[in-house]
Amino acid sequence: MELGPLGPGTLTWDCIGDLRCALLIIRAGVLQAMHPAVGAALMDHSDVFENQWNRLLRSVPPILATVYAGDKAPAIGRRVRDFHTGISGVDDTGRSYHALTPDVFFWTHATFFESQIAMRELYARPLRRDEKERLYDESIRWYATYGVSLRPVPPDYAAFERYWDGMVADVLVATEPVRWTFSPAARESPPPFPWLAGLPWKALRPVVVDGSNWLARGTLPVPIRERLGLAWNARDERQLRAFRVAVRGTFGALPTEWRYGTAVRRARRRGRAETAAAEPA
């Protein structure tokens, strides 16, 4: 399989930076934090309880950079990896953990990969089987930029599906950070940035916090929702269907490049220009 940085023409470039992925940010965070080692690391080494949204938002740019930075992606990937060097301890089961254990590190990556498929299923044209296989092959190239062992990486998409189902069924648990995310205390989360304090955050918090948690409840795998005891009824399902239709219609009417944030739009333009310049005249 080809390894190396991703670039224009890859499905990952089209999917991961799509703003609709932001609608799944709490969903991805919950799935990550349900791994016992990740949940313990958040308890021991994170400010997730003090400022959940700042933690989430500051983690996004380095992850996106490992996709959109071209030849610089491996260096950025190694920096992302090295952020986790000192993150270790003992989880709730009494097992030692380290954030750079390949099985743990790959699980966090797996949630970002799966989020792209979920985003397309929920809010855009669902990917065909061959497109999912292609996207998964690209995800291995993406993961390789971190310089972490590829040992736990399933070799193809069919194997990944079995891996994912096994993680959902047998590994993920209701860790303390996940329980807190859906508790009343999380509704009092401070603004992610000081300049949002006061009236702006008072207006935004019901949408950002309550809305994101509601979307997570509705879009998590059903076994996970049931394991966490999250309420979801027929009215919620109707409202989610209506929301999905609205998002599809809104984004379908936008020019393609406006489906991405400013930094990703710049990176996509730069990548296309560099590719064109490298082509023989």
Image (cartoon, rainbow, N blue to C red):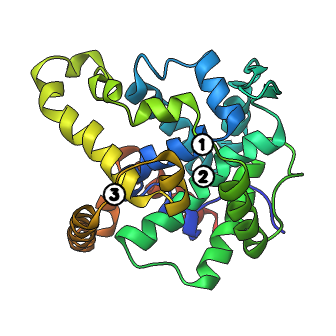
Compare residues 165 and 82 and report the one nearer the observer.
Answer: 165
Marks 1,3: beta carbons within 8 A: no
Q: How far apart are marks 1 and 3 (CA)?
A: 21 Å
Residue 10 quadrant: bottom right
| Residue of label 2 | 111
Marks 2,1: beta carbons within 8 A: yes
Q: In which quarter of the image is the N terminus?
A: bottom right
Judge whether residue 281 can be spotted in this image: no
| Residue of label 3 | 232
Q: In percent of the image, x 49 and y 38: which residue is there?
A: 60
* Sooner in the amino-acid sequence: mark 1 or mark 3: 1
- Residue 162's place in the image compared with 215, above or below, is below
User: What crowding class fits label 3: few (fewer than 14 Cα within 10 Å), some (14-19), or many (20 or more)?
Assistant: some
| Residue of label 1 | 32
Secondary structure state at the residue bearing disc 1: helix
Residue 102 percent coordinates (x, y):
82, 41
Q: In percent of the image, x 75 and y 68: which residue is there?
A: 162
Q: How far apart are marks 2 and 3 (CA)?
A: 22 Å
The amino acid sitting under disc 2 is: Thr
User: What crowding class fits label 2: few (fewer than 14 Cα within 10 Å), some (14-19), or many (20 or more)?
Assistant: some
Judge whether residue 188 can be spotted in this image: yes
Residue 78 percent coordinates (x, y):
74, 34
- Residue 186's place in the image compared with 270, above or below, is above
Marks 2,3: beta carbons within 8 A: no
- Residue 219's place in the image compared with 29, above or below, is below
Q: How far apart are marks 2 and 1 (CA)?
A: 7 Å
The amino acid sitting under disc 1 is: Gln
* Sooner in the amino-acid sequence: mark 2 or mark 3: 2
Compare residues 115 and 222 and report the one nearer the observer.
Answer: 222
